[in-house]
Image (cartoon, rainbow, N blue to C red):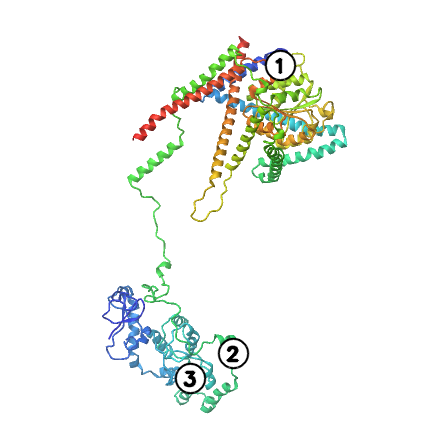
Amino acid sequence: MLERISQLADPIGAIIGFTLTIMVLSYLIGDNIFFRLAVSVFIGVASGYAAVLILYNVIWHQVLVPVFQVISTGKTDDLITYATHVLPAVVLGIWMLTKVSPRLSRGGTPVLAFLTGVGAATVIAGAVRGTIFPQVGASANLLNIQTGPDELSKLVGWFINGVIILVGTVTTLIYFKFGIKRQEEGVPVQHSVILEYLSTAGQGFIVITLGVFFAGVYIATLTALIDRIQFLWDVIIGFF
Amino acid sequence: MTDIICPLCGKPNPPELEECRYCQAPLNVSGFLAPSDQEGQENPFILSPDEPDQADSQVIKSESTSALEQSIPDWLKNTEANFLEETEAKPERQAPDDISEQIDSLLSQPSTPDNVTQPAIDDDWLASLLAEAGGESSPLSSQGALLGDIEEPVNENIPQPFIEEPFKAKGVLPPTPVEKPDWLTGLEASSKIKLEGEITPSEGIDQGAGITESIESIETGSMEIPDWIGKIEPEEISSNLEEPASQIAPAELPGWLEALRPEDNVPATEPVEDLSAADIVTAGPLAGLRGVIGARPSAIRARKPPTYSIKLRVTDEQRARVEMMEALLADEQKPKPLPSQPALTSRNIFRLVIAAALILPIAWMIITGSQRVPTPQPGDVPGVIDFTQQVQALPTGLPVLLAFDYEAGFSGEMNLAVSTLITQLAIKNAFMTLVTTIPSGPAMAESLINSSVGLDGNQGSYSYYTNLGYIPGGTMGLVGLALSPKSVLPYSLDGIKVWASAPLDAISTINDFSAVIVLTNDPDTARSWIEQVGPTLKIDGTPLLIITSSQAEPLIRPYYEANPSQVQGMVTSLAGGLAYGLSVGNSQQNGEWDAFSISITASVLIILIGSISRAALKIPITGKKKES
């Protein structure tokens, strides 16, 4: 019986997937109940799966199982490890539950502040170490001849590429310079002419970058459409 | 000759003038006429033109035709008339009875020295009141005048008063002042009009003589005098009165008090508070006074509040409007069904046409399994060669960390490269440690591992891996994973403590993995891995490889092309997956690349046709606007 069900699981999954794909593609004719039903099913399944995963993967395996192991084995080392690594997180997590009640929600503010502060510090430190300093160094090395190719034909392309990247970086940063020097009273406020031209060039680079981002999103969506059509065709071929 | 007192500035004007010659205020409207000198007597109400100094002290009489006088109540007019009559008749009523004579003898002032000028009485009615109360003004009032002289206008003819020297000279104590009612004292103090019979300070000083005379009159009078009084000689009384003055040493005033003492030759000053522009009270008991707050008895009069009916009186028209408003509000609460739109609108047709233009070529390529479009080569896609070399360089049998951080919707774009990677890792017999930072990641990882081809050529046959599941905490979880993986994910999804057995028992930090490969469609997730885990991996030179979507490529590629590079290899989108497959000898594809190519071509055509059509439609409209 179980073996037969397991053999049927894949076809049932294929049929469900086929049906849901058609329901989502029905949005072509406008908003309808099939599309809404498919979206609702997706949201419900995703939420339920995430809740089960967190309960099982985090609460059970990372909070409760260590307690049982400490009790069963009675090892002092495990107890110390649990007390130092897991217990603070458990206490903060339970404390955070006060946010559920409007009456007690202010009690969870310190935990929220702690999370926000630590999160912000982590992100900023990571951005400085992982993005700002390395990218500034990379921009400085763009036209470093020692890092360039040996062949002359490639060297020209490397140089042009480096110049474009350097100009794009500088002009884009200039575009985001909004400060102006204090003018005398009655004199119209304006940037210097050179900065205006460089800012316009930076604006052009930004537009190109946004266009590339949009093209990437469009290509990803088009690839997903191709994948769904491929799936539909595979299901049809599989049944017939 | 009768002058007209200006109601505004209070100065006399000739009767022939219609406007005040000082302030140009109209005189015949609200001006006051001074009473005429018909009887030839020296009437305080009459202002003589040759006595301009006394103009300010005149008692005014309102003109009968003025509007202001009309607003004066009758009782006040009668009161004023009585005052006038009494004042005029007072010289004729100087035949007092006995008691009045006695009182007068006690309270009357001694004769004023010739060198002291009597100040003019400004307020006759006040003078008459004082006369009725007990004769001339009291020493208290004179003392009050002394203290209040700072603000009072002083007649230049009046010698400046002072107290001490006359007292010292005569040695006479001031007599007991006659008690006046409080209201009269207050009114007298607040009035800027001076009494004509007000006693100067020097007069007050002479009250001692008056006392002596009074004693003489008592002695010679018909009153019953006690025997002990009769035995007292006048000389003794005068000597007794003079003795204390001679015995009392003159007071030495402190310097600050001397500085405060008014000087004798201080010129007369104008009143500090100019009331000439103030309003005149037109009603109430203070009617006719200027610069005071008029009492409004009617405002504080307690009376029973009127009774109003609580029934709203509405007309038929108002009632009809109320009913209409209620009907409108009732309709607002009822849900209205949305108007049904026709199924075939131009917008829907346009949408269907575009969908057909995209879907039909794709479907055709997939159905036919077309492979006419040349597959992208590894050298044409950036990062593929480096990625392949890094995977090929992995040692056999060592653990590799695989982060499945992409959504199922991007499986069509990434599954080809991921499947090829899993196959290559399986060939290397690498221990795949699966982690994720998104909830759907564990299922995706399990699904791909099971669908990949194992070493034996069968799907799902590779079992040398562990799925550690979800990393909680987002960015902070990544930091924890980089520093201590076994603390963040101590158990696998199966509940096995994998860190206690090989090959993960040799892992203490993330550097101990032979490689970290991130599979993500989100640029932010990729950036978090690069920022939080990358610096730690760089310490020991552990490669960080990324398989990503085309939408994340523009953000990740700078990290790959940087010098030194932060990402040692990357495979991007469907093209990258195909190129990676080609690089490892897997050229299998079921028409996806042809479908992708033709869909890109169709998209470009749609955009071009749409832009040209819009421009063609817009040009005539713009021309019409210009013509108009």
Front residue of B516 and B223:
B516
- Mark 2 near mark 3, Cβ–Cβ under 8 Å? no
Front residue of B198 and B239:
B198
Q: What element does badge 1 sit on?
A: loop
> Mark 2 or mark 1, which is nearer the start of the sequence?
2
Kindly report the distance in space between the C-alpha atoms of the residues bearing marks 1 and 2: 123 Å
Q: Residue at x 50, y 26 (%)?
A: A214
Horizontal side, residue A197 vs residue A90: left or right: left
Residue bearing the label numbered 3: B206
Numbered mark located on residue B85 in the image:
none
Kindly report the distance in space between the C-alpha atoms of the residues bearing marks 2 and 3: 24 Å
- The chain that hosts pointer 2 is B
Location of residue B259 with respect to A74 vertically, above or below? below
* The image quarter in which residue B26 lies: bottom left
* The image quarter in which residue B445 lies: top right
Residue B415 appears anywhere in the view: no
Number of marks in picture = 3
> Percent x, y for residue B81?
28, 72
Do circles 2 and 3 both sit on a common chain?
A: yes
Mark 2 or 3: in front is 2
Horizontal side, residue B488 vs residue B305: left or right: right
Residue bearing the label numbered 1: B585
